[in-house]
């Protein structure tokens, strides 16, 4: 170790030229100087990891080994998603990140697309679609002057359909509640009815009547809630497929003319969010949410 510290910190860590990048006669990169620089860099890297990890651990008030276990469990969940359809999905991640952050649509282009009769036909055709137990939503792309909508199924709808089939079967009712109670609390735990019923069931775990009520309320709430399926959204950015045009943002429909919610506004800090608020069969309001605010709004009439 006494040989390792014969270089200055600047030479070994901050200045790249005494390291691997300096050309040497006969490609002799691994001379004693470079070897010492490598050791220095390894030590600095490990020290940085330890310092950062300790800071995160202290900030979260967790023991380091518990934090490691938690992060490892999270990484294990993400690994199947990363490796699915390899390497297509892996390529899609940076493509989506780039298009979301650096290839956004212009206000004038969206405004012009909404004024086009062909876009209106697409919008009101979409509004005629009725999915049971969920709002309609997905991703929107600008192509040839049109705003084109690609619906993506709502995970809540699939759960609600399964719950619907189990409501009149006591054996399946309890099994279904146990299967989805964590999902219900995660998605709608702040709802007063869900919170109250959840507390009651914890006191009487075998109360099937309360289980049925909480499951029915989840189905009801799912009718007014859209959550994009990230797995399917990512597949729209696969390379070597037909071009869908310029990615514009995520969209969903409010069926009863509601304005964008606080959750919608919060989501718009990460990506463009388009809300189609259906006022009537031939009129809707288009909201473009961006950076946590309503960036643009426009009334759209079917026959105008």
Image (spheres, rainbow, N blue to C red):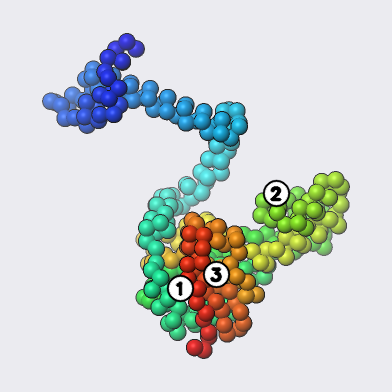
Disc ID at residue 1: none
Q: Position of residue 15 (x, y in %)?
A: 25, 29
Q: Quadrant of residue 216?
A: bottom right
Name the residue beneath numbered marker 3.
275
User: Residue 174 versus residue 39: which sits nearer the camera?
Assistant: 39
Which badge, 2 or 3, comes first in the chain's sequence?
Answer: 2
Instruction: Please identify the residue farthest to the left as the structure is shown.
Output: 25
Which badge, 3 or 1, comes first in the chain's sequence?
Answer: 1
Up the image or down, 172 lies above or below 60; here it is below
Tally of numbered tags? 3
- Tell me how far mark 3 sits from mark 1, CA to CA: 14 Å
Disc ID at residue 182: 2
Disc ID at residue 148: 1
Residue at image coords 43%, 69%: 141
Is residue 110 among what the camera can see? yes
Neighbours of disc 1 within 10 Å: few (<14), some (14-19), many (20+)? many
- Tell me how far mark 2 sits from mark 3, CA to CA: 28 Å
Q: Secondary structure at mark 1?
A: strand
């Amino acid at each position: 170790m006494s040989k390792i510290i014969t270089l200055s910190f600047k030479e070994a860590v901050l200045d790249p030229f005494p390291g691997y990048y300096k050309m040497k006669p006969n490609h002799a990169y691994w001379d004693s100087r470079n070897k010492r620089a490598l050791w220095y860099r390894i030590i600095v890297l490990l020290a940085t990891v330890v310092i950062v990890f300790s800071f995160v651990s202290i900030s979260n008030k967790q023991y380091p080994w518990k934090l490691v276990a938690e992060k490892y469990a999270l990484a294990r969940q993400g690994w199947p998603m990363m490796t699915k359809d390899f390497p297509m999905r892996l390529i899609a991640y940076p493509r989506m990140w780039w298009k979301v952050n650096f290839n956004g649509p212009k206000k004038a282009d969206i405004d012009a697309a909404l004024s086009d009769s062909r876009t209106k036909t697409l919008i009101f055709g979409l509004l005629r679609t009725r999915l049971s137990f969920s709002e309609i939503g997905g991703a929107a792309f600008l192509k040839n002057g049109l705003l084109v909508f690609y619906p993506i199924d709502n995970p809540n709808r699939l759960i609600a359909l399964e719950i619907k089939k189990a409501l009149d079967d006591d054996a399946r009712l309890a099994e279904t509640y146990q299967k989805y109670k964590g999902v219900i609390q995660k998605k709608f735990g702040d709802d007063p009815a869900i919170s109250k019923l959840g507390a009651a069931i914890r006191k009487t775990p075998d109360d099937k009547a309360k289980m049925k009520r909480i499951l029915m309320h989840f189905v009801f709430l799912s009718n007014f809630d859209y959550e994009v399926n990230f797995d399917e959204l990512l597949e729209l950015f696969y390379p070597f497929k037909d071009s869908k045009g310029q990615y514009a943002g995520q969209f969903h429909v409010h069926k009863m003319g509601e304005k964008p919610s606080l959750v919608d506004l919060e989501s718009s800090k990460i990506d463009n969010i388009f809300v189609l608020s259906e006022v009537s069969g031939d009129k809707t309001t288009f909201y473009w949410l961006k950076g946590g605010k309503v960036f643009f709004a426009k009334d759209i009439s079917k026959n105008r």
